Amino acid sequence: MTRRYPNLGHYPKIFLPNAEAETTQSKRLYEDVGLNDAKIRTIRTLTPQREYLVTAPAYTRVMSLGLGPAALSFVGATGVEDLQWIRQLVQTYGALWPPVWLRQRDCAHEAQWWEREHDRRQGKEHPHETLFARDSAAAALSHGREGAVRVWER
């Protein structure tokens, strides 16, 4: 098999779930980047918005991102309508749009956390410097927030 994109073989590649991965057109695209039938079948069976296939010269792994509803509300906002709505929120609320978005996605607790953190960080030169600070991560874990990454071979 001749790969259409031979230089991609040196870098890790991340593949999203695709229920139509084994259709003729999709399969051809996956084969062009070097995937075999087993990997294409794996892509078809991955859980959307949770599992991803990662391939590199030395390994192939299925990664599972344990994202909670708040994180998914942001990373899953990829449609044209979502992006238009976010632009509207930014225009209306400026830098304070995220808690509005979170409440609209039934993440009121996370919206309250965002507002507390925003208030606490007011006046800092770099407003996001404590977003992932150790104490914030420990607090999130103590409240049962998801965020773990699990890796296993298939």
Image (spheres, rainbow, N blue to C red):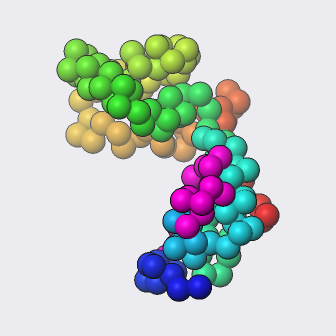
Residue 78, placed above or below residue 65: above
- Residue at far front of view: 24
Give whichever of 117, 37 is nearer the camera. Answer: 37
Give whichever of 111, 28 is nearer the camera. Answer: 28
- Provide the residue span drawn in magenta: 10-28
Residue 91, placed above or below residue 34: above
Quadrant location of the C terminus in the rendered image: bottom right
Residue shown at 50% from the left, 29% from the top: 73
The picture places residue 35, in percent across and down from the top left corner, at 62, 72
Q: Is residue 122 left or right of residue 51?
A: left
Q: Is residue 53 left or right of residue 29?
A: right
Give whichever of 59, 129 is nearer the camera. Answer: 59
Residue 102 among those drawn in magenta = no
Quadrant location of the N terminus in the rendered image: bottom right
Residue shown at 36% from the left, 43% from the top: 129
The quadrant in which residue 50 appears is top right
The picture places residue 65, in percent across and down from the top left corner, at 64, 47
Q: Answer yes or no: is residue 52 visible.
A: no
Residue shown at 51% from the left, 81% from the top: 3
Residue 10, placed above or below residue 14: below
The picture places residue 11, in percent across and down from the top left corner, at 49, 76
Query: Disc count in the image?
Result: 0
The quadrant in which residue 91 appears is top left
Give whichever of 79, 100 is nearer the camera. Answer: 79
The picture places residue 37, in percent across and down from the top left corner, at 71, 69
Q: Answer yes or no: is residue 69 visible.
A: yes
Residue shown at 22% from the left, 15% from the top: 92
